[in-house]
Structures are given as structure tokens and as C-alpha cells.
């Protein structure tokens, strides 16, 4: 999407870590947080979702999470305390002076969105994509899988899930040391806390995506949740044009 006019900003995250923030469009503010191993460009821009949302009338604010993309990637474990990603993104809301905005994310971005809500963020509408209830209340459910991949790079048989996960890491030029430390930032959110989020929330998930539990269970527990199914599994649903369409349809309804 080379015709998408992007601006790059830097905010100060937890401990003063530089957090790169990519912005596009004009209109209502929409903060979008990418998934694990990914970055703002891969998750939102590469496959046209950002362009669809800009066309729908939004100013997109797309941070690269700590350890990812163009943000700081320290190798010191002390730079990755519990809820560090939440701290960074709450700092983004504060430093950009956002008061009337929408908020969403894919996979780890959805988990970070939920942590922000649990800690007092007040967006108008919410998008939780690539996420089920289990992935929020038991955040390290698949932590062992990722630790295995990151600790044994180069050893997996071609075509296996682990091989494909490693291939994605290479595609995004991810830092394996930082990625391992990111796992230590995960914090569970109790189901009863999630059940108290009042915002209209779209739970958008691939039909074959069960990586983070059952998305329908998440939408059912939310007072104003709605489940939207799109084609694909956890790895490829984010590449489908249906994701951007579903997001735009929900936010403009």
C-alpha cells in the first residue's frame, strides 16, 4: 500500500523505551495493536486493512510493540516486566492526548487491548481479533510452544507449525531474544473482569482459528460483544481482505 501516506512518531514507553508509532488518515482516532512476532506494517498496512479504515474515515494510530518492529528491543530481561506492553500503550494514549477514540488489536494486540481496558482505558468501541476467551484468562497456554520455537531455531522440519512460525519471525525480522522476553510480560485477565467491559466489541476471528481458544466464548461473555467470523486460521486470517472489511463495517455501523 505504497499510496498510503504514513507519518512516524516516537513516544516514550515504560522506562523511557522508544516506541515507534505509525499514523495514517484523518478523522476519528483508532488505535490498532499488532500481534506477536509481527509489527504495524505487516499486521495492518501490508494487506490493505489500514487503507480500508482510512477510507472509512479514521486516523489510524499503529504502534510497534516493545521488542517488535521499529521500537526499542532491549535484551535485558528487566525491560520486560509484567504488563509492560499495557504500560507502553497506556502511555501512548496519554502522550497523544487521546480522549475520544476506538481501540483494537490482533492476537497479542487483542490481549494488550484487554489489559488496557482492565486497567482503565476508555475507548468508545473495541475490536478483539484472533482471540478467544482462553487466550485472555490463561495467557501462557501456548507459551511453551513459543519458547520451544525460539529456543530451537533452525531445527524444525519444513512444513510443520514450528517451521512456519519461525518463517514468520524471519519475514518480520523479529529479534528472538526480545521475543522470548515478551512472554514474561503476559498477565491473565479474569473472566469476571472481561465480563464487565461495557463497550460495543467486535470479536473477529478466522473460522479455523482456535489458537487462543474459542472466539464465540469471548463474544458471549461480553455485555455488548458480537462475533464476526472471517475465512482462515490464526496465521492467514490476518492476510485476508475480510478482516479489514469486518473492522470497517463494525466501526461505521
Image (cartoon, rainbow, N blue to C red):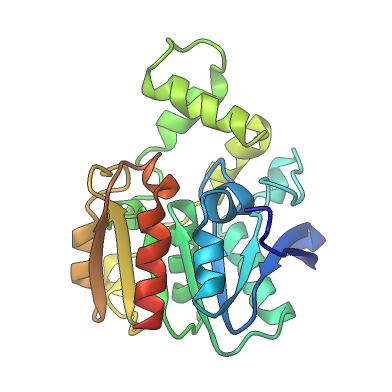
Q: Nearer the viewer, residue 57 or 185?
A: 57
Which residue: 56% across, 18% down?
153
Name the residue: 56% across, 63% down.
Answer: 51
Image location of residue 26, percent across then percent down: 64, 80
Q: Could you say which is closer to the camera, residue 166 or residue 151?
A: 166
Image quarter of residue 54: bottom right
For the C terminus, the quadrant is bottom left
- Quadrant of res 209: top left
**x and y percent of residue 134 in the render?**
28, 52
- Above or below: residue 131 compared with residue 104: above
Q: Residue furthest bottom?
A: 100
Does residue 195 show up? yes
Identify the residue at image location x=68%, y=34%.
Answer: 175
Picture layout, residue 41 above or below residue 194: above
Residue 173 percent location from the top left of the image: 67, 33
Q: Nearer the viewer, residue 5 or 7?
A: 5
Left or right: 160, with 38 as reference point: left
Is 3 positioned to the left or the right of 184 in the image? right
Q: Is residue 75 left or right of residue 46?
A: right
Residue farthest front in this picture: 3
Q: Is residue 119 visible?
A: no
Image spot of residue 78 (x, y percent): 71, 47
Number of numbered discs visible in the structure rendering = 0
Give the left or right position of residue 214, taking residue 19 as reference.
Answer: left
Tell me the residue at 56%/89% (across/down): 100
Amino acid at each position: 500500500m505504497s499510496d498510503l501516506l504514513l507519518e512516524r512518531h516516537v513516544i516514550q514507553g515504560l522506562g523511557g523505551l522508544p516506541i515507534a508509532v505509525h499514523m495514517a488518515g484523518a478523522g476519528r482516532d483508532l488505535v490498532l495493536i499488532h500481534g506477536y512476532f509481527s509489527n504495524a506494517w505487516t499486521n495492518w498496512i501490508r494487506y490493505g486493512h489500514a487503507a480500508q479504515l482510512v477510507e472509512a474515515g479514521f486516523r489510524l494510530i499503529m504502534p510497534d510493540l516493545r521488542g517488535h518492529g521499529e521500537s526499542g528491543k532491549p535484551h535485558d530481561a528487566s525491560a520486560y516486566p509484567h504488563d509492560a506492553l499495557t504500560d507502553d500503550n497506556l502511555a501512548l494514549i496519554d502522550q497523544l492526548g487521546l480522549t475520544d477514540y476506538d481501540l483494537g488489536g490482533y492476537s497479542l494486540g487483542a490481549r494488550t487491548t484487554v489489559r488496557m481496558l482492565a486497567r482503565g482505558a476508555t475507548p468508545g468501541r473495541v475490536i478483539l481479533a484472533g482471540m478467544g476467551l482462553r487466550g485472555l484468562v490463561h495467557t501462557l497456554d501456548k507459551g511453551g510452544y513459543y519458547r520451544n520455537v525460539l529456543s530451537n531455531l533452525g531445527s524444525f522440519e519444513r512444513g510443520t507449525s514450528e517451521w512456519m512460525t519461525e518463517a514468520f519471525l524471519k519475514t518480520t525480522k523479529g529479534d528472538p531474544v526480545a521475543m522470548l522476553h515478551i512472554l514474561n510480560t503476559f498477565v491473565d485477565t479474569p473472566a469476571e473482569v472481561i465480563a464487565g467491559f461495557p463497550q460495543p466489541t467486535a470479536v473477529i476471528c478466522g473460522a479455523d482459528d482456535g489458537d487462543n481458544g474459542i472466539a464465540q466464548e469471548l463474544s458471549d461473555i461480553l455485555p455488548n460483544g458480537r462475533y464476526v467470523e472471517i475465512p482462515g486460521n490464526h496465521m492467514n486470517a490476518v492476510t485476508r481482505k475480510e478482516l479489514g472489511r469486518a473492522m470497517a463495517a463494525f466501526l461505521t455501523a
